[in-house]
């Protein structure tokens, strides 16, 4: 009887996989990656709001969301918080939030999220650190379900998600993912979503490290901001997709990918570093900026080479720090000239603006398909049965 049941289960899987793959021939898997950096995330959010509005305008459907057009979303630091917002799902597996919702949330809750922590014996002296408790209260409130009674977990996302942090316990990066949370063999890697975001946002100079444990209590992480080692998570997302045959069985190489990588601010190295012209000495902040920007730019160069500098399949958009003609930050970053990396290093200004590049990418997404190229993974829907839950 057990053998027959196993055979039937395998036949069901085979049919589901065949149907899933047949619906996705010649379709690229789309990756959205959002850099860490900063606290307001105004630049990345401006790009995302413009992208979502461009998609809605081109399709005539105001109900479409960014998550409908990407198959995986990765984010570092506050970019991880944005990724969680974009993929958090309701009971119908639809995205809970629009890009505009994210912008409004960050604006309205900025003071509560980054509330200065009082220091000194009598708590009169202000410090540069922010209150972790205040941030945690905000995150708990937004990433919950059942009338805020039950915390959301990594499994409660409508699309695969990647959020890195740095684990002080192991002195190594720790990447939270829905794939690891959903896999039966790694069920101890499911974490509450608000805790993942809290750990990802624990920039050492701003927040204290955050300790979190998995839902089953078997896995622990003492996390700080992943931006210290992975400020640009695009390479991690590409590698994840190439090796995750459960969620992305039709991907064989980068030729099957369509990637949008969003920076979260102008490079610190664009003429703003604090370097002593006489001695060449750098401040501590300068060294950190060089390291963080260096990681992002190295990833950009590596992926450009991996995609053979295919400007259509791999698109990197970031602020150049020169400013546009707009009256607000959003208008400025959308109207300023776009930049792109050169094959042998360095960057060049393009004729088109950041806003125009986003609109062109939105057109490509819409032309490919109105809905997500990958329906919900059959593995995700059946994994509870396989796990006996």
Image: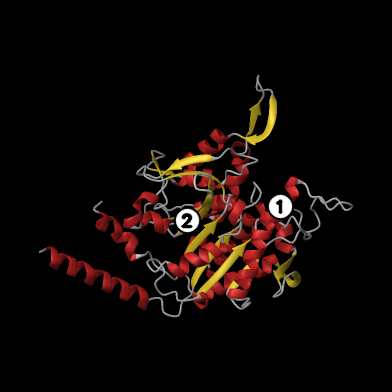
Seen in the picture, residue 139 relative to 247 is either above or below; the reply is above
- Which residue is rendered at x = 74% and y = 61% of the image? 320
What residue is drawn where x is 48% and y is 63%?
72
Circle 1 crowding by C-alpha within 10 Å: few under 14, some 14–19, many from 20: some
Q: Secondary structure at mark 1?
A: helix
Closer to us: 12 or 176: 176
Q: CA distance from mark 1 to mark 2?
A: 29 Å
- Residue holding disc 1: 289
Query: On residue 87, which mark appears?
Result: 2
Could you tell me which residue is drawn at 74 percent across and 69 percent down? 347
Which circle, 1 or 2, is nearer the viewer? 1
Quarter of the picture containing the N terminus is: bottom left
Task: Relative to 71, say whether 343 is above or below.
Answer: below
123 to 269, vertically: above or below: above
1 or 2: tag closer to the N-terminus = 2
Where does residue 200 sit, x and y in percent of width and height? 54, 48
Q: Secondary structure at mark 2?
A: helix
Asked whether, in this view, residue 160 is left or right of residue 204, the answer is left
Quarter of image, res 19:
bottom left
The reply to whether residue 152 is in sight is: yes
Quick one: which residue is furthest to the right in this view? 278
Q: Position of residue 13 (x, y in %)?
A: 27, 69
Pointer 1 with pointer 2, Cβ within 8 A: no
Residue at the extreme bottom = 26
Q: Is residue 68 left or right of residue 333?
A: left
Residue 281 picture location, percent across and down: 81, 50
Find residue 352 and report its horizontal and vertical position in percent: 72, 71
Q: Residues within 10 Å of mark 2 (few under 14, many from 20)?
A: many
């Amino acid at each position: 009887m057990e053998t027959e049941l196993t055979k039937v289960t395998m036949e069901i899987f085979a049919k589901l996989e065949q149907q899933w793959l047949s619906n996705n021939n010649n379709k690229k898997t789309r990756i959205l990656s959002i850099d860490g950096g900063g606290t307001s995330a105004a630049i990345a959010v401006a790009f995302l709001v413009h992208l979502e509005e461009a998609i809605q305008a081109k399709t005539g459907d105001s109900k479409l969301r960014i998550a409908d057009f990407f198959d995986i979303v990765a984010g570092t630091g506050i970019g991880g918080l944005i990724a969680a917002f974009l993929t958090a799902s309701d009971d119908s597996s639809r995205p809970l939030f629009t890009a505009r919702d994210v912008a409004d949330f960050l604006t309205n809750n900025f003071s509560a999220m980054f509330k200065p922590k009082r220091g000194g014996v009598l708590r009169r002296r202000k410090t540069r650190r922010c209150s972790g408790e205040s941030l945690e209260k905000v995150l708990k409130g937004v990433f919950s379900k059942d009338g805020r009674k039950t915390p959301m977990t990594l499994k409660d996302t409508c699309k695969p998600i990647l959020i890195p942090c740095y684990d002080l316990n192991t002195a190594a990066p720790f990447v939270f993912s829905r794939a690891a949370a959903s896999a039966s063999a790694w069920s101890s890697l499911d974490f509450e979503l608000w805790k993942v975001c809290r750990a990802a946002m624990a920039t050492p100079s701003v927040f204290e490290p955050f300790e979190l444990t998995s839902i089953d209590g078997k896995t622990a992480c003492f996390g700080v901001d992943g931006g210290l080692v992975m400020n640009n998570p695009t390479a991690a997302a590409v590698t994840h997709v190439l090796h995750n045959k459960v969620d992305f069985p039709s991907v064989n190489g980068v030729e099957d990918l369509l990637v949008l990588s969003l920076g979260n601010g102008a490079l610190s190295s664009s003429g703003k570093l604090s370097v002593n012209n006489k001695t060449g000495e750098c401040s501590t902040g300068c060294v950190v900026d060089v390291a963080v920007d260096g990681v992002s730019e190295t990833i950009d160069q590596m992926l450009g080479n991996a995609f053979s500098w295919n400007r259509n399949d791999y698109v990197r958009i970031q602020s150049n720090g020169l400013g546009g003609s707009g009256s607000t930050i959003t208008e400025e970053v959308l109207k300023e000239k776009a930049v792109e990396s050169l094959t042998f290093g360095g960057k060049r200004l393009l004729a088109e603006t950041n806003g125009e590049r986003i609109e062109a990418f939105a057109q490509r997404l819409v032309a490919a398909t109105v809905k997500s190229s990958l329906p919900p993974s059959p593995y995700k829907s059946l994994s509870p049965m396989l796990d006996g839950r």
